[in-house]
Image (tube, coloured by chain):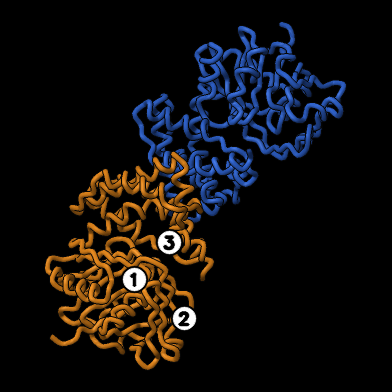
Chain colours: A orange, B blue
Amino acid sequence: MSKKVFAVIGTGAIGGYYGARLHHGGHDVHFLFNSDYQHVINNGLKVDSHYGDYSITANDINAYEKSADMPKADVILVALKTTQNHLLEALIRPLLKPDTLVMLLQNGIGAEQEVAEAFNLPYVGGGLCFICSNKVAPGHIDHIDYGRITIGVYGEDGIAPLESFAKDLTGCSVEVDIDPKIMDARWKKLLWNVPFNGLSTVLDSDTAQIMDCQELVNLSKDIMMEVQQAAQTTDTEIPTSLIDTMLGNTAKMKPYLTSMLLDRRNGRELELQYMYKNAIELGAKGGVSMPKTTALYEQLCFINKRIVSTVQ
Amino acid sequence: MSKKVFAVIGTGAIGGYYGARLHHGGHDVHFLFNSDYQHVINNGLKVDSHYGDYSITANDINAYEKSADMPKADVILVALKTTQNHLLEALIRPLLKPDTLVMLLQNGIGAEQEVAEAFNLPYVGGGLCFICSNKVAPGHIDHIDYGRITIGVYGEDGIAPLESFAKDLTGCSVEVDIDPKIMDARWKKLLWNVPFNGLSTVLDSDTAQIMDCQELVNLSKDIMMEVQQAAQTTDTEIPTSLIDTMLGNTAKMKPYLTSMLLDRRNGRELELQYMYKNAIELGAKGGVSMPKTTALYEQLCFINKRIVSTVQ
């Protein structure tokens, strides 16, 4: 079997970290950059990590500014924020072979199905990254902690390539869990993300402040139960005990600023379509209304409009 | 018929204005003060008004620091914020005669019933003041505009005393509408107050900003329809056309800062019990759930806790 070709679309805190680990493990990795391109072809890519620092020199890195210049890939890691997903069609098409595994390392729900339908692919994978990693400067990533990734696939036939990719990752010392149906994994992550990302963003508060207010604990739980019911419409069974466990863990956690609140504070567009709109629409399609989730989403739309109009 | 005795409980922007108008019309008015007492017995009460300025001199004013010192009253005007209603029992009891008309000039819903039950009164009146008036200094009220008052009564037998009070007001050039059942008037005012006070407070925004965001218009309308349904449980019929009219008018209004948002910005406790909790409980008692109103209320509880903990 010839060596696999990996493409990383969006070389930031997530894509840069996992791409560099694959490169470190000896794989043939090709990185797409946006604003960092010029810096990287001059200086290479640098990943500080508590697992050991690793750099790819300017000589060694396969860096690209346009996906059309990249080789066709066996695995495409998409690590853009979902607010950029309108670009995916153009970015992915040049890289596809008939059996390419597209892996969406993104938040929210619904993107695998969209990509599968857009390219008529038999399967599309997804990954949930439990990682603390930041891009601190052009071509410079600071991986602070964790790194475990849960992967799954949308479509019946994707298990074999998914397992093969899991082996690639574990061979590079990345911890991997397989949750075969990616929808299951995504709903379970939404169970927490929908209430806590949204409420923390609307109320400009950390998780400890939320858990310290009984009314907000009640609201969080109600929203989680709406997500639980919406998940059932796509055959994802979430036990109620998981809701209680998550709330218990959140109450014990150190005060935590959600990624969406950080996006708000930093004036970055919020990931509303995949984290809220798609979930609400999936629920509605299955006859489940989500009034409290919808109310939260509508407030977030208001906040997002302020952000976007300031950015422009 | 001997001259009526009026008592004003809470002589601020509202109580001071209407009390002064009654005094100006020749009525026997007795004012309860809190922090302004010492100032008023030295300097009197001053009302600047676009209907003509009016002062009651220190010599002429019937000012009190304790309600126990006041004479029993024919009409008690309660103009405290509802956040002070836990004090009503002690403040009102000394002033009651068997046929006293208590008039609650307050926001929200449910206080008339509470007061009627607490004192075993056959009727309790309420008033909704459409007025722009501020207390700008101790004993100094600035009445900027409007002043119309809608009054009604809780309890079957109160119409005669209510109409008599309405005549007193119109005799003092106060415009009065009678909406016989006070619950009808209160629900109709809540129809606007529940969505717009709450959303403007949570999102720190004026009415124009809210109406400029289609998702928030949708959310406001959904909340209004919840209030409409809750109102039906107490036999108040609100036509859907009123919702559309109110939304249309709000879209045309100049940007407006709601009273609750001003309370938030000024670090004052929010009027949540009478404007939200009672409405939700009345709905629930009649089998109407109000999920979007409840979600908004729970967020407001969080904001209020921050305010109250800062005040203490």
Residue under label 3: A259
Q: Nearer the viewer, residue B45 or A111?
A: A111
Q: Amino acid at mark 2?
A: Pro
Q: Nearer the viewer, residue B19 or B116?
A: B116
Instruction: Give the spatial CA distance, label 3 vs label 2.
Output: 20 Å
Query: At x 20% / y 49%, what residue is drawn?
Result: A237
Instruction: Using the rendered view, name the quadrant where residue B85 is placed.
Output: top right
Same subunit, tags 3 and 2: yes
Q: Residue A259, position in %: x, y?
A: 43, 61
> Which chain is mark 1 on?
A
Q: Residues within 10 Å of mark 2 (few under 14, many from 20)?
A: some
Secondary element under disc 1, as helix, strand or loop, is helix
Q: Amino acid at mark 1?
A: Asn
Q: Residue B41, position in %: x, y?
A: 84, 25
> Marks 2 and 1: which is nearer the front?
2
Residue under label 2: A138
Q: How many marks?
A: 3
Query: At x 40% / y 84%, what residue is drawn?
Result: A45
Q: Amino acid at mark 3?
A: Ser
Q: Is residue A94 visible?
A: no
Secondary element under disc 3, as helix, strand or loop, is helix
Q: Nearer the viewer, residue A81 or A30?
A: A30
Query: At x 56% / y 44%, what residue is drawn?
Result: B306
Q: Residue B61, position in %: x, y?
A: 82, 22
Q: Is residue B62 above or below residue B244?
A: above
Residue under label 1: A85
Q: Taking B177 as reference, is B291 left or right?
A: left
Q: Taking B20 as reference, is A7 left or right?
A: left
Return the disc, 1 or 3, that comes first in the chain's sequence.
Answer: 1
Q: Residue B294, position in %: x, y?
A: 42, 39
Q: Taking B120 as reference, is A117 left or right?
A: left
Instruction: Give the spatial CA distance, label 2 vs label 1.
Output: 22 Å
